[in-house]
């Protein structure tokens, strides 16, 4: 049975937000999920306020989607999201994602519940995949948590460009190329790009 990726998540600290701030964060989340649906044809659902699930098939772009969601929130409202990524099979889908079942849904939901100080985790029943994902994801997550809003905005915009370049990014941000490059370097964008590529390679090999 072929594998899919299920991303289960919620907005960090949303319960302490005032209504206006919560709505702003929810709008940023919704816009990000809708953009991913348009780009990759994935299916998503938001429920219980700020909880969400996203189903992606094939699963190779799961990290791209998780990083997009987190960067979009940081860039727009300086908030973050916890995301558990489950890789596995699923049962026939129910009308609502929240009522669907299968290995990927279970791994994603339980993985999200297991996250404490870490905001992102990848979970698989395949020991080979789990072993390679675990440590690298911790490093990537730590870097994402440390991003400032301006750094997140720069990286988010950079990855949205049809032809990414520091010059093009500077034009979008309305700053000099030197400042755009500085923001990207502070975000450790090259390491995060290598992380995304490594994830895809592992998924292709599994």
Image: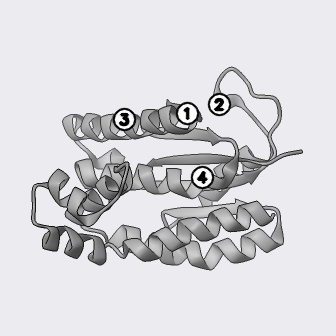
Mark 4 lies on a secondary structure that is: helix
For label 3, the residue is: 31
- Disc 4 to disc 2: CB gap under 8 Å: no
Q: CA distance from mark 4 to mark 2?
A: 19 Å
Label 3, label 2: how many angstroms apart (C-alpha)?
Answer: 18 Å
What label sits on residue 61 in the rendered view?
4
- Please name which of the two marks, 1 or 2, marks the residue nearer to the observer: 1
**Is disc 1 in contact with disc 2, using a CB cutoff of under 8 Å?**
yes
Q: Nearer the viewer, residue 174 or 125?
A: 174
Crowding near pointer 2: few (<14 within 10 Å), some, many (20+)? some
Residue sitting at 49 percent across and 32 percent down?
38
Give the residue pinned by disc 2: 97
Q: Where residue 65 appears, x then y in whole percent?
A: 51, 50
Secondary structure, mark 1, is: strand
Q: Which residue appears farthest toward the top when viewing the image?
A: 95
CB within 8 Å, label 1 to label 3: no
Q: Residues within 10 Å of mark 4 (few under 14, many from 20)?
A: some
Mark nearer the N terminus (3 vs 2): 3
Q: Position of residue 20 (x, y in %)?
A: 20, 35
* Label annotation for residue 44: 1
Among the two numbered marks 4 and 2 on one chain, the one whose residue lies closer to the N terminus: 4
Taking 60 as reference, is 99 above or below it? above
Point out the tag, 4 or 3, that comes first from the N-terminus. Answer: 3
Per the model, the C-alpha gap separating discs 1 and 3 is 12 Å
* Marks 4 and 1, the one that precedes in the sequence: 1
> 185 or 87, which lies in front?
185
Q: CA distance from mark 4 to mark 1?
A: 15 Å
Q: CA distance from mark 4 to mark 3?
A: 18 Å
User: Which secondary structure, mark 3?
Assistant: helix
From the viewer's perspective, is the residue at label 4 or at label 1 nearer? 4
């Amino acid at each position: 049975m072929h594998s899919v990726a299920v991303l289960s998540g919620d907005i960090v600290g949303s319960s302490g937000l005032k209504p206006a701030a919560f709505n702003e964060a929810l709008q940023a989340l919704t816009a990000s999920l809708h953009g991913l649906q348009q780009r990759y044809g994935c299916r998503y659902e938001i429920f219980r306020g700020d909880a969400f699930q996203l189903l992606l098939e094939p699963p190779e772009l799961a990290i791209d989607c998780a990083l997009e969601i987190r960067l979009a929130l940081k860039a727009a409202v300086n908030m973050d999201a916890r995301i558990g990524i489950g890789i596995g099979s699923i049962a026939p889908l129910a009308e609502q994602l929240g009522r669907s079942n299968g290995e990927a849904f279970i791994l994603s939901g339980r993985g999200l519940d297991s996250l404490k100080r870490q905001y992102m985790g990848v979970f698989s029943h395949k020991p080979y995949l789990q072993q390679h994902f675990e440590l690298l994801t911790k490093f990537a997550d730590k870097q994402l948590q440390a991003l400032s809003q301006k750094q997140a905005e720069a990286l988010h915009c950079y990855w949205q460009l049809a032809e990414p370049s520091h010059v093009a990014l500077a034009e979008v941000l309305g700053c000099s190329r030197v400042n755009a490059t500085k923001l990207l370097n502070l975000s450790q964008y090259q390491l995060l790009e290598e992380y995304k590529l490594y994830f895809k390679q592992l998924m292709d090999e599994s």
